[in-house]
Amino acid sequence: MIDLKVQPLDEKRILISGIPPALAAVLHELPEILELRDSPGVRARLYPNPTADDKINQEWRQITGPELRHLFVSAAETVGRDLTALTADVESGDAYRVTFPIEHVPAWMSALNQARLVLGEIHKIDEAEMSRTDFDPHSARHMAALRIHLLGYLLHLFVELDGGDEPENHI
Amino acid sequence: MAPPIETGQPGVVIIDETKAKDELSSPWNVIVHNDPINLMSYVTMVFMRVFGYPRVRAEMLMLEVHHKGRSLVWSGGREQAEHYVHQLHTYQLLATMEKSEA
């Protein structure tokens, strides 16, 4: 049974506890997955064209591209450093835990979502693949979909932590 | 911008001010497109953060994206539309903008 939790440890730190070994393995791979962000197909997804006009799109890429890339890389680096503190959770059997500063939450959400999109693009994951409930461990595509779901489960907990009905209630 | 109208008199052109103003003030639509990966809860949160929409409206728009493949999430001036599209891209949503036909 998964008892994964994302919660404030105190006013300054967030604790992710009860991380199952399968998710811990994906988190260990996170920096490696995120380095694939510059693959051609992935670039088109992470830096989409804003219009149908080639000239506007080209100008857009020149203006916003470097800033977006800096944002994505910076988030990945922050989470990569935080993940060096990922350790066995002695209170939860074979699970893992990690703590990090509360101001890193946006970086975590960005990095988790980036990784899901990178895996989705690299393995051409579609709606049907995302609806799959049986995963063949010998299929790279099935395993990519499984990793997307595992990261999605953690991302959803971050969204819940963000909570609140009003926009200003987020962290 | 509307092209100037030649008058035949040297150095004198008439600019169709009304048409030029119309083009500048035509609204732009910000569209969010469906993708199989982004979480529904994540997309809702992004709409609340970027546009300041209450949860009910954000969820309604998210469901429209999910079921219809796209949703017009905001309409207004071009500069603001560009700002919103950029914000949505920072959250890794598939967002585009197009001039309103209306």
Image (cartoon, coloured by chain):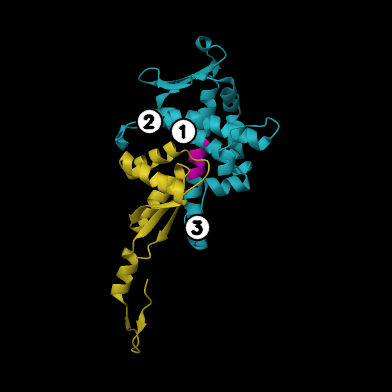
Chain colours: A cyan, B yellow
Magenta-tinted stretch: A68-73
Identify the amino acid type marked 1.
Met
**Quarter holding the N terminus of chain B?**
bottom left
The CA distance from mark 2 to mark 3 is: 33 Å
Q: Nearer the viewer, residue B95 or A39?
A: B95
Mark 2 vs 3, N-terminal side: 3
The subunit carrying tag 3 is A
Task: Give the amino acid at mark 3.
Answer: Asn
Q: Is residue A43 magenta?
A: no
Q: Is residue A71 magenta?
A: yes
User: Which residue is under mark 3?
Assistant: A57
Q: Are marks 1 and 2 in contact (CB under 8 Å)?
A: yes
Residue A163 visible in the displayed image: yes
From the viewer's perspective, is B94 left or right of B73? Answer: right
Mostly what secondary structure, the magenta segment? Answer: helix
Q: Which mark is residue A109?
A: 1
Q: Quadrant of the C terminus of chain B?
A: bottom left
Tell me: residue A105, above or below residue B58: above
Can you tell which quarter of the image residue A136 is in? top right
